[in-house]
Image (cartoon, rainbow, N blue to C red):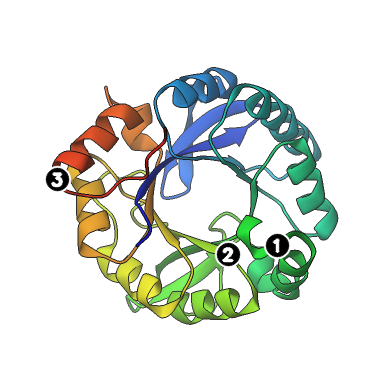
Amino acid sequence: MLKKRVIPVLLLRDGRMVKGKRFSDYRDTGSPQTAVRIYSAQDADELVLLDIQATTNGHRALLDILHLAAEECFMPLTAGGGVTSLDNIRELLLAGADKVLVNTATVTRPSLIKQAAESFGNQCIVAGIDYRADDNGVPKVWIRSGHEPTSLDPVDHARHLADLGAGEILLNSIDRDGMMGGYDLKMADAVAHAVSVPVIASGGAGNFMHLAEALSNTAVSAVACASLFHFGDNNPIRARSYLRNQGIQMRNLK
């Protein structure tokens, strides 16, 4: 059985960390360089660095932060944002990323997942799925940072991406993003049971109990957090200690 993981997420814009609610109303949350050092010292299992601008300048800032993180950290690093080609993936891996997150291109160019898995190995390809409920309350996949809806069902999309070669799925609820009211356990469990690769639940963590609920009551392998660590006196060390006390088997970092 896979040990569970707690993964902080750093959203980057203009070289700074930001956090919003439901993919909007972003506010500055500090220096990513400082955050990388802190999370490295706080027993984070992994770290996700995501450029939400996907511009040339934003991509350069992401590469610079990746270089720094690779020099100073021993935890696995996942990077993404605007990834549309094998060259983008190669550049991020050479900059120090252990895994690359592909999101919009999983819809606009799904063949990239297969090509990337064949070129670099599926262990370093993470497929990102952002979803929210449509006007009828039916969950659908959204792309381009939550600005463009699709007709895709998140579970079916996850299954397809795993079949193409994605080694991991990062599942993010837009409706719960930044709201700190807990994960979408139903969808997280449905996706985790639909695929044979690890699934990371994201969107909604507001306290350690939310982490425990997702890791205990669904089949996900990991939980991703941003607001939980940005807006409160919380850190990965305390989160992992709490989860262990709840009887959850955490990955041994030593």
Residue annotated with mark 1: 121
Q: Residue at x 49, y 25 (%)?
A: 40
Do the residues under discs 3 and 2 have CB atoms within 8 angstroms? no
**Any mark on residue 145, and which?**
none
> For this view, does 192 lie left or right of residue 153?
left
Percent across and percent down for residue 209 are 17, 45
Percent across and percent down for residue 217 are 20, 63
Q: Residue at x 55, y 19 (%)?
A: 31
> Quadrant of the image for the N terminus?
bottom left
Do the residues under discs 1 and 3 have CB atoms within 8 angstroms? no
In this picture, is 45 found above or below 155? above
Dot 2 falls on a residue whose secondary structure is loop
Q: CA distance from mark 2 to mark 1?
A: 8 Å
Percent across and percent down for residue 231 are 32, 27
Q: Residue at x 74, y 33 (%)?
A: 63
> Quadrant of the image for the C terminus?
top left
In this picture, is 70 found above or below 173? above
Residue annotated with mark 2: 167
Do the residues under discs 2 and 1 have CB atoms within 8 angstroms? yes
